[in-house]
Image (cartoon, coloured by chain):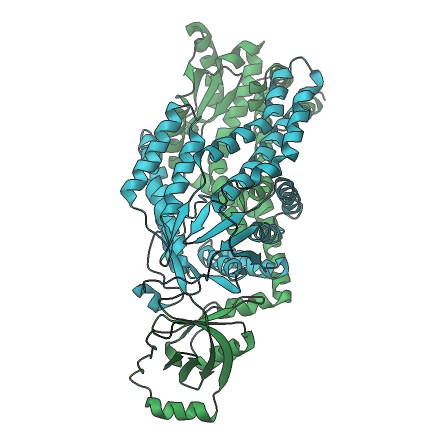
Chain colours: A green, B cyan
């Protein structure tokens, strides 16, 4: 420390006794003593000092430094695990830093001020508590995964059909940036609308309607507001209207079970979980950390596909059609996907086609 | 395949590329940075934060973040002193709530009125330079070494020139000018940093960024090869091709991370002192690979271990070439008087890694 610099002296707090009396109390028995480095408020140069604390006063003394202030005015750094330095900020903006953690702990007790993160720090010191916390987190994840998320999202989705309407409307408008108008003939479209009318008639409250788009990919999808979209390519791929009837029942099943909105709610709940759990994990590690979430998502979507398949099965049965038509359609989609990567899109979120086909064959044959 | 072998050779030599070419004459002292955090300690810090964040529906995450930062800063050492993180969790929470409200509002708006999606995109684009400058300024003044905080002196209007200039050249060049644009952004931010009376100067050259990105694209050659050769070679179809291309992308991204960290930190002069960063390619790959596997296998419980290892590697590869004593003089910021957890309000909490 440059000796030309003026020595700082903190002004006494109004309520405290006279500085002279305090000096006397230091001389007799300082309650806490420690070695530290002193930093002037305007300079980052460490100056070795000795620090004395009485019940009410703090005194910092070393070569060219003699500073005193009310103990209650000093801010002690939050405690942190491990061998670290602990700082004490004086009201002038000066600071002392020490490696003497035991002395700093006594100083915290002596000052009687609430310690920032004090209780958290006590919790962090305990291994049993850490293990309990781990069990709690893992338990919460398991409960959320198998029960809470599906049930809660289902309730929300069923409770607010109005929201579904608006989301669906916005989605198709957004998708239309990518999709082109259908090039199917008017008669073909009218015929398929007729097929669809029998599906829609079974769910009068759901506002089901059918749209056609050209997408370059054989695909069918539904939106939460009840819009079912067939692409030109899936219509061309099908060999029989009953195959498409199965697809339409499948998509209507998604709408009726509220899958679209469920998906939206699920992703936001999972995102909340992810922020609490992963926080600011490094990006590359975050990819690994995100995989269980991706798995959770695809697990839900597989369950939804099976639910929609069941709707297709029942629908075809009610019409007196062979449910295996839908199985044929699935196989055709898979074959088409084999030829081109892009067609994998329809199948990626779905369970293995062979498994779904097997379910149909097994239940349809007896 | 010859191409792949040459890429492998190139990758093994990658360490040579990392060395910083822009050194000055050998200074008096080389001060190693040191990180002393331990996974066993940080795990407990982290798990308490996770539990409380879950119990409070995410509110506590601001406190958990501050607690993590306190741990990492206090265990980062240079020349016998450690760093300190002094941001207030309340400020962070406020920043996060404002941000969440904004995003939520825009989402609702576009549900009700679809074309609003373009409005929100434009708003996000327009806000980005401002947000990056404010959040960097917040992080800077929350970082204290020897009682002197860092600070960022960067005008928002110049930030707009730099960022939008970068967007424009990147767009016009179909992405080819991206390394230059990123270099310019980093130069703008680093040159704006101050440590007390010491000014930061960034002397990494633009060409170094271009050559780093060029080399990173060479890592992608196997992926391109797999895509092109796929129809002729049936065994390359499907899974093997996907493995080759995703492996190439991962290697390229690890390479870019290491090399840009070295160019970013290794090009910093603070007053008379100079930083060196020596992250090496293969150790970094090993670190990322093992960390990712551990995180995956433990459903995320290994995240603290991964973070501590990465921090140790990054900090331990830093050296400060110091000429003379490190001390600086500093203006006394009146807000510092209020002490821990009272750093003046800013848009905190939006932590965008600009590095």
Q: Is residue A51 left or right of residue B194?
A: right
A336 relative to A160, above or below: above
Q: In which quadrant of the rendered view does residue A180 lie?
A: top left
Q: Please indicate whether residue B193 sits to the left or right of residue B39 in the image.
A: left
What residue appears at the point 56 percent right and 67 percent down from the top-left corner?
Answer: A123
Q: Position of residue A315 (x, y in %)?
A: 56, 22
Most foreground residue, A19 or B248: A19
Residue B101 visible in the current orientation: no
Residue A298, given in percent of the width and then of the height, sits at 58, 35
Q: Position of residue A40 (x, y in %)?
A: 38, 70
Judge whether B72 appears above or below A111 on screen: above
Label count reads 0
Residue name at image x 52 percent, y 33 percent: B212
Write the residue at 46% across / 36% down. A261
Viewport quadrant of the N terminus of chain B? top right
Q: Residue B225: x percent and y percent?
A: 62, 20
Is A324 or A92 nearer to us in this picture? A92
Q: Is residue B241 visible?
A: yes
Residue sitting nearer the eye, B155 or A337: B155
Relative vertical location of residue A321 with respect to residue A57 in this rendering, above or below: above
In the shown orientation, is residue B171 left or right of residue A270?
left
Q: Residue furthest left?
A: B157
């Amino acid at each position: 420390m440059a000796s030309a610099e003026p020595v700082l002296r903190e002004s006494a707090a109004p309520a405290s006794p006279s500085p002279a009396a305090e000096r006397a109390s230091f001389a007799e028995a300082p309650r806490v003593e420690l070695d530290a480095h002193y930093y002037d408020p305007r300079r980052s140069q460490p100056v070795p000092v000795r620090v004395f604390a009485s019940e009410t006063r703090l005194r910092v003394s070393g070569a060219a430094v003699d500073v005193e202030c009310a103990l209650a005015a000093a801010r002690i750094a939050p405690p942190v695990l491990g061998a670290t330095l602990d700082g004490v900020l004086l009201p002038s903006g000066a600071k002392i830093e020490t490696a003497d953690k035991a002395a700093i702990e006594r100083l915290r007790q002596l000052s009687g001020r609430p310690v920032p993160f004090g209780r958290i720090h006590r919790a962090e010191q305990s291994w049993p508590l850490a293990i309990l916390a781990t069990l709690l987190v893992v338990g919460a994840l398991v409960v959320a995964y198998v029960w809470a998320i599906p049930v809660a999202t289902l309730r929300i989705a069923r409770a607010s059909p109005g929201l579904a309407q608006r989301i669906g409307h916005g989605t198709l408008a957004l998708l239309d940036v990518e999709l082109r108008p259908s090039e199917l003939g008017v008669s073909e479209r009218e015929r398929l609308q007729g097929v669809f009318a029998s599906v829609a008639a079974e769910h009068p409250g759901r506002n089901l309607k059918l749209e056609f788009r050209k997408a370059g990919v054989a695909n069918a999808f539904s939106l939460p507001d009840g819009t079912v979209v067939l692409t030109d390519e899936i219509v061309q791929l099908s060999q029989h209207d009953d195959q498409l009837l199965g697809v339409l029942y499948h998509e209507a099943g998604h709408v009726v079970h509220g899958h679209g909105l469920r998906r939206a709610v699920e992703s936001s709940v999972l995102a909340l979980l992810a922020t609490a759990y992963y926080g600011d994990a490094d990006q590359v590690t975050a990819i690994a950390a995100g995989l269980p979430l991706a798995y959770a998502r695809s697990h839900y979507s597989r369950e939804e596909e099976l639910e929609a398949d069941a709707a297709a099965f029942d629908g075809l049965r009610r019409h007196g059609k062979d449910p295996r038509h839908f199985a044929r359609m699935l196989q055709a989609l898979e074959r088409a996907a084999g030829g081109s990567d892009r067609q994998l899109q329809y199948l990626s979120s779905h369970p293995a086609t062979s498994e779904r086909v097997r379910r149909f064959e097994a239940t349809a044959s007896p | 395949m010859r191409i792949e072998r040459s890429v492998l050779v190139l990758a093994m030599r990658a360490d040579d590329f990392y060395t910083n070419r822009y050194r000055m004459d050998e200074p008096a002292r080389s001060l190693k940075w040191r990180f002393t955090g331990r996974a066993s300690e940080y795990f407990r810090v982290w798990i308490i934060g996770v539990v409380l964040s879950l119990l409070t529906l995410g509110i506590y995450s601001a406190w958990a973040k501050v607690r993590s930062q306190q741990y990492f800063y206090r265990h980062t050492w240079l020349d016998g002193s450690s760093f300190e993180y002094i941001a207030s969790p309340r400020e962070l929470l406020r920043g996060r709530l404002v941000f969440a409200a904004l995003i939520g509002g825009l989402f609702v708006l576009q549900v009700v009125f679809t074309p609003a999606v373009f409005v929100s995109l434009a708003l996000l684009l327009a806000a980005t330079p401002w947000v990056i400058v404010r959040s960097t300024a917040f992080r800077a003044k929350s970082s204290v070494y020897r009682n002197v905080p860092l600070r960022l002196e960067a005008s928002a209007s110049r930030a707009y020139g730099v960022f939008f200039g970068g967007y424009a050249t990147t767009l016009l060049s179909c992405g080819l000018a991206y390394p230059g644009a990123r270099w310019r952004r980093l130069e703008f931010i680093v040159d704006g940093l101050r440590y007390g009376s010491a000014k930061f100067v960034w002397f990494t050259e633009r060409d170094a960024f271009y050559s780093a990105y060029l080399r990173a694209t060479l890592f992608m050659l196997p992926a391109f090869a797999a895509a092109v050769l796929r129809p002729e070679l049936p065994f390359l179809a499907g899974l093997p091709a996907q493995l080759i291309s995703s492996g190439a992308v991962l290697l390229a991204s690890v390479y870019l991370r290491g090399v840009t960290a070295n160019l970013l930190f290794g090009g910093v002069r603070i007053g008379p002192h100079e930083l060196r960063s020596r992250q090496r390619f293969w150790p970094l790959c090993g670190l990322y690979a093992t960390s990712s596997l551990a995180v995956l296998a433990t459903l995320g419980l290994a995240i603290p271990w991964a973070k501590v290892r990465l921090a140790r590697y990054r900090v331990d590869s830093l050296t400060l070439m110091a000429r003379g004593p490190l001390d600086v003089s500093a203006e006394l910021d009146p807000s510092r008087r209020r002490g821990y957890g009272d750093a003046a309000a800013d848009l905190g909490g939006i932590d965008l890694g600009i590095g």
